[in-house]
Image (cartoon, grey):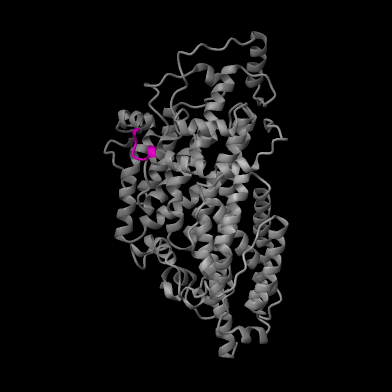
Amino acid sequence: MSNPEYYNAVKELLYKMADDELIMGHRNSEWTGIGPVLEEDIAFGSMAQDKVGHAYNFYQLLHEMGEADPDIIAFQREEKKFKCCHLVELPIGEYDFSLVRHFLFDHAEYLRFEMLSNSTFEPLANLAKKYKGEIKYHVFHANTWIKQLMNGSEESKARIQPSFNELFATAYSIFEPGPFEDTLAREGVFAGETVLQSKWEETVSSICSANGIILAQVNDKSLAYGGRKGYHTEYLSPLLNEMTEVLRSEPGAIW
Amino acid sequence: MYGGGYTGEPEKNQPQAQDDPVLLAEFEAKIDRGEKIEPRDWMPADYRKQLIRMIEQHAHSEIIGALPEGTFITRAPGFKRKMALMAKVQDEIGHGQMLYSAAETLGKTREQMFNDLLSGKSKYSNVFNYPAITWADVTVIGFLIDAAAIVNQVINSKGSYGPYCRALERICYEEAFHLKQGHDAFVALAAGSPMQRQMAQESLNRWWEPIMHFFGPSDKMSVHSERLMRWKVKLASNDDMRQQFLNTYVPKIWELGMTLPDPNLKKNAETKQWEFTEPNWDTFFKVINGDGPCNKERLAVRKWAEEKGRWVRQALINPKEKYTLPYA
């Protein structure tokens, strides 16, 4: 921890992971009460709780490294300081859109935790091992529904494919490289976004092809980059405003 | 939550089904012995009908009740409240799911129940026709509406229909935590800044009448079915439940230095009964019949969810599978 570059590299990694989880969890929670079947309200609610819980613990880890309290990091940072990727920021849309986003995001999340389980940064490795076990069920949920709906009605097939068309290129925003990729790899903290991306491409394309989903050729994978540097879609700002609405009504109060 | 709130009297002036007197006597003897009635047991047609109505409306109350609080999941102040509220509202949806299954054992499908909710034929707890305007409303719902529902549900869990009682026992266990989180969040406001206290007070003032309405009209106004009591479908009178609620929760509100908008509210030392200004029952009937501040909005959201989700449900239908009633 004495090496400041190492220290900053780990923090950078934690921030983007935590922000992804917070925003994805927030979006998932928006399905509470309006899902297509009650069981899906409940499933998205569970995933939301897991994700917001993960975010909290990553922020807590950052706090132990000298950053502010989790509640301050999550609810009092300005938009530009957020490092989440564009994929998680998009509104929930209809169920097919949310499901496909969940499929694309959680496969990356699972593989990321699998890689981080061997991280030399032990507190992160410990969390990753635990969360891998939870995200396994998120992935299982996504795979089951993709399969069901691709083997369901003509309408369900006709809805899933366009959502992949719409989201697949944006999903590459997850893998936008950070400024410390080399340090993280050299120190054995994290093998890097490029490695993660190719693992993800392999998994996702094999499941998609087994279910008759065509994934478009993405020529420019950096089209949706920016989130990791603090440049966001127009959807993040209203989300953050909503998330902090009550807190801002009486700054400094205990709720 | 949420259920158990008064959703109207059983339909009157309908011919009662003629049940086999021998079977009926056996059925009533079983209830007298304190045994539970199970889905495959013989039961009078009216018993089945009243239970379906009651469990179904309880289930609707859970999923409609998730809506006012649900709008604050994305706005809950800080991690602690956000995590608790997400879990709490998810529980309520889960209660709905459990209760729909319990009602299904009596022969009505979830789809039929949803259709009756959307057409307005089937009601839900009237209290959810009011809006949650501020965060304080979420705390008042979590604290006092959940508390009122617990009073009702604990009583109903001693009823005669096995699947409903078992569902209620599980529900009450979770509700106890909901009440704690609601109370905790309410106390935070009551012990907070002047603005937070004011927010909590205004919320109490807004919700007091719907809360007083929660258990339904006074026993003086509503006719009881002696038969439903004997069958352990209805186990306590509206007034008894209201008294029980006031007795436990009014002191908890007062001890926080908060007030309730009824100058006549007090416990009579002699009768040990709470005295209060009778809430406006015309308002109550107006709201329950569809003319409340949020009736249209609540049903519109459910309609949206039903319509937008139809393709998902249809895609799951396997023509080779046949619908069977659950038996638990």
- Give the image location of residue B148, x and y in percent: 45, 39
Image mark count: 0
Confirm whether the magenta stretch covers residue A127.
no
A236 or A96: nearer the eye? Answer: A96
Which region shows up in magenta? B291-296
Report the residue at 61% width, 83% height from top.
A181
Residue found 65% across the figure and 39% down from its top: B317
Q: Nearer the viewer, residue B318 or A180?
A: B318
Name the one closer to the observer, A145 or B290. A145
Residue at position x 35%, y 28% in the image: B285
Q: Check the image and report above or below for B55 versus B70.
A: above
Counting from the top left corner in percent of width and height, residue B252 is at 40, 46
Give above or below for A92 relative to B30.
Answer: below
Q: Is residue A56 visible?
A: no
| Above or below, B50 relative to B245 | above
| Furthest-bottom residue in this view | A3
Left or right side of B29 for A247: left
Q: Position of residue A190 (x, y in %)?
A: 65, 79
Q: Is residue A65 left or right of residue B37?
A: left
> Picture quarter containing residue B289?
top left
